[in-house]
Image (tube, rainbow, N blue to C red):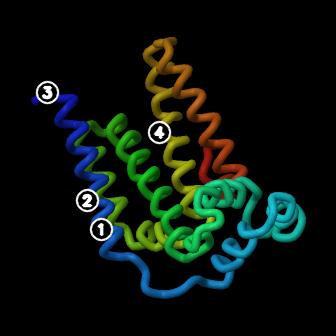
Amino acid sequence: MTERRRWITLCVLTLIGSAAWFALHWPHSSFWYDETTVGYVIAQSWPSVWQWATMIDLTSQLPLYLILIKLWMLPFAGASIAVTEFALRTSSVLLAFLSVAGMLALARRAAGKLGGFAAAVILVTLPAFVYITFEVRVYGFAFAAAVWSYAALWELLVRSAAQKIDQRLWRAFAVYVLATTAALYGHYTALLVFPV
């Protein structure tokens, strides 16, 4: 088995293990008020979602999260699963997988393959991470965007220090800009995460 294949197998097993861990810790409680509000808002028309995010609820979240959740729920439109707790929480779980994959990428680049695996396992077992994994709130989205932003920033720093200007550098730059912008348009607290 080649080194690359072993690493891909390890990543896949980590994500499968994460799925099992999340399944074991699936919440048994119902939504909090603000989670219910997200479900209510995304069940409305697009103009209503935009109005809510830009004029009514300016204190907790910016428009990008509500828009993405509304897009996530489009395939379920008209089905009985449309705005259920399970469908909404699944979006947060998928964001958690995105966070774990980002942590694998970041820590692998910073600390090697074993470090990447260890960081992903530690992340998945952190109680705060498990908590935000099942919350239908913007925190999981902001965390995933921040992790990918840092992974891309790390790649940018490594490549520019080695003076390697190639396609990977520009790809890392694009991911950094997209992830940072997504985090900043997702939640106000993202301002506290990024270097000045």
Mark 1 and mark 4 lie on one chain; the one further toward the N terminus is 1
Q: Are marks 1 and 3 in contact (CB under 8 Å)?
A: no
Mark 2 and mark 3 lie on one chain; the one further toward the N terminus is 3
- Viewer-closest of 53 and 158: 53
Q: Are marks 2 and 1 in contact (CB under 8 Å)?
A: yes
**Mark 1 residue element:** helix
**Mark 2 residue element:** helix
Q: Amino acid at mark 1?
A: Trp
Query: Which residue is under mark 3?
Result: 2
Disc 2/disc 4 C-alpha distance (Å): 22 Å
Q: Are marks 2 and 3 in contact (CB under 8 Å)?
A: no
Category of crowding for the residue at label 2, using alpha-carbon neighbours closer than 10 angstroms: few (below 14), some (14–19), many (at least 20): some
Q: Are marks 3 and 4 in contact (CB under 8 Å)?
A: no
Quadrant for residue 123, please give it: bottom left
Category of crowding for the residue at label 4, using alpha-carbon neighbours closer than 10 angstroms: few (below 14), some (14–19), many (at least 20): many
Disc 3/disc 4 C-alpha distance (Å): 25 Å
Image mark for residue 21: 1
Q: Position of residue 90 (x, y in %)?
A: 49, 65
Disc 1/disc 4 C-alpha distance (Å): 24 Å
Q: Say whether residue 133 is left or right of residue 184.
A: left
Mark 1 and mark 3 lie on one chain; the one further toward the N terminus is 3
Which residue in the rendered view is the most extreme toward the left?
Answer: 1
Query: Which residue is under mark 4?
Result: 151
- Viewer-closest of 82 and 47: 82
User: Across the whole image, how many numbered discs are drawn on residues?
Assistant: 4
Image mark for residue 186: none
Category of crowding for the residue at label 3, using alpha-carbon neighbours closer than 10 angstroms: few (below 14), some (14–19), many (at least 20): few
Image mark for residue 17: 2
Disc 1/disc 3 C-alpha distance (Å): 28 Å
Q: Position of residue 8 (x, y in %)?
A: 25, 37
